Image (spheres, rainbow, N blue to C red):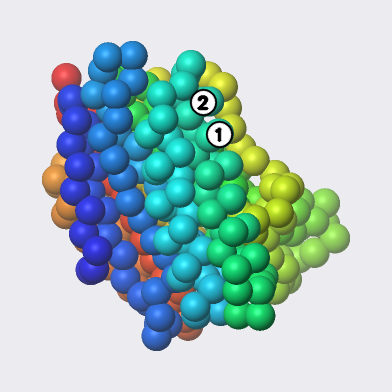
């Protein structure tokens, strides 16, 4: 596991790490910062999954994470406004880099998940197919929208227009309907109201490489009672063990709220 991330504030601990999977390069990026929100110390975490070739994908993800955290650092009227500013700053950073070297970086982009936690509340904004999960014991819930084609392919399966096997193999599943490319963003998931996070729960940000891990393995890792850094390691091992043929870059951040 590389690029270990460690941040704490109030009753929250966030730890993160990543593996290249079966790729030679790493095009995911992650980061975080301690922020003040209404006089209370909180954490903001960012995770991006790059696309557009080795140089472009890695750069887009790094620019998005750095730009988002810089944008969020500026105080605004509420946390959703700060997250929107972070998203805009991330997209603008990609636009400027693409304009400077269009022959090399044209077409680069990335997904982005931003999540902020303070006290018993969490806020988020996301674009693309990277995951934001809430783990409460064995219960595992995806909070953010999936902006890949996978939900539309699954709908075709439910309608009987594709078989379950055809849906699982459909190459369109991994195509993105929205991403940060420096252009206007097609789809953004940005709830205005915070999510209530009970004591002992885990908030997880992950790139889509974690989808290689079986649902049961993810639930087991997050309900294990281990410290967040050990849960990150367990999730990355589960992704590596669960892959069928090929494992993409996989990055995970686990944010744990202390038990009552």
- Alpha carbon of mark 1 to alpha carbon of mark 2: how far? 6 Å
Residue linked to disc 1: 84
Indicate the secondary structure of the residue bearing disc 1: helix
Cβ–Cβ under 8 Å for marks 1 and 2: yes
Residue linked to disc 2: 80
Q: How many marks?
A: 2
x and y percentages locating residue 91 in the rendered image? 58, 50
Q: Nearer the viewer, residue 224 or 175?
A: 175
- Which residue corresponds to the image point at 41% horizontal and 30% vertical from the top-left? 74
Q: Quadrant of the C terminus?
A: top left
199 relative position to 105: left or right: left
Choose top left, top right, bottom left or bottom right for residue 242.
bottom left
Q: Residues within 10 Å of mark 1 (few under 14, many from 20)?
A: many
Residue reaching furthest to the bottom: 24
128 relative position to 165: left or right: left
- Residue 211 disc label: none
x and y percentages locating residue 180 in the rendered image? 61, 54
x and y percentages locating residue 52 in the rendered image? 59, 74
- Decide if residue 43 is in sight here: yes
x and y percentages locating residue 142 in the rendered image? 50, 41
Indicate the secondary structure of the residue bearing disc 2: helix
Residue reaching furthest to the right: 161
Choose top left, top right, bottom left or bottom right for residue 195.
top left
207 relative position to 224: left or right: right
106 relative position to 87: left or right: right
Is 138 rendered above or below residue 166?
above
């Amino acid at each position: 596991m590389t690029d270990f991330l460690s941040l704490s504030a109030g009753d929250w601990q966030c730890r993160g790490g990543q593996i290249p999977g079966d790729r030679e390069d790493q095009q995911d990026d992650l980061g975080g910062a301690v922020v003040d929100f209404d006089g209370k110390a909180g954490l903001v975490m960012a995770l991006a999954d790059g696309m557009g070739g080795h140089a472009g994908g890695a750069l887009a993800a790094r620019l998005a994470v750095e730009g988002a955290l810089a944008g969020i650092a500026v105080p605004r009227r509420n946390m959703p406004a700060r997250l929107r500013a972070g998203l805009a700053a991330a997209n603008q950073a990609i636009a400027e880099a693409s304009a400077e070297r269009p022959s090399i970086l044209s077409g680069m982009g990335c997904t982005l998940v931003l999540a902020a936690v303070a006290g018993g509340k969490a806020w988020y904004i996301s674009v693309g197919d990277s995951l934001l999960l809430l783990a409460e014991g064995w219960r595992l819930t995806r909070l953010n929208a999936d902006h890949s084609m996978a939900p539309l392919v699954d709908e075709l399966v439910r309608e009987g227009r594709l078989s379950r096997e055809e849906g699982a193999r459909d190459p369109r599943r991994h195509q993105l309907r929205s991403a940060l490319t420096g252009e206007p963003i097609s789809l953004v998931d940005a709830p205005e109201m915070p999510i209530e996070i009970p004591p002992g729960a885990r908030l997880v940000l992950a790139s889509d490489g974690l989808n290689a891990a079986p649902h049961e393995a993810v639930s087991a890792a997050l309900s294990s009672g281990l410290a967040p850094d050990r849960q990150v390691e367990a999730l990355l091992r589960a992704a590596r063990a669960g892959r069928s043929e090929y494992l993409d870059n996989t990055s995970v951040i686990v944010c744990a709220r202390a038990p009552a």
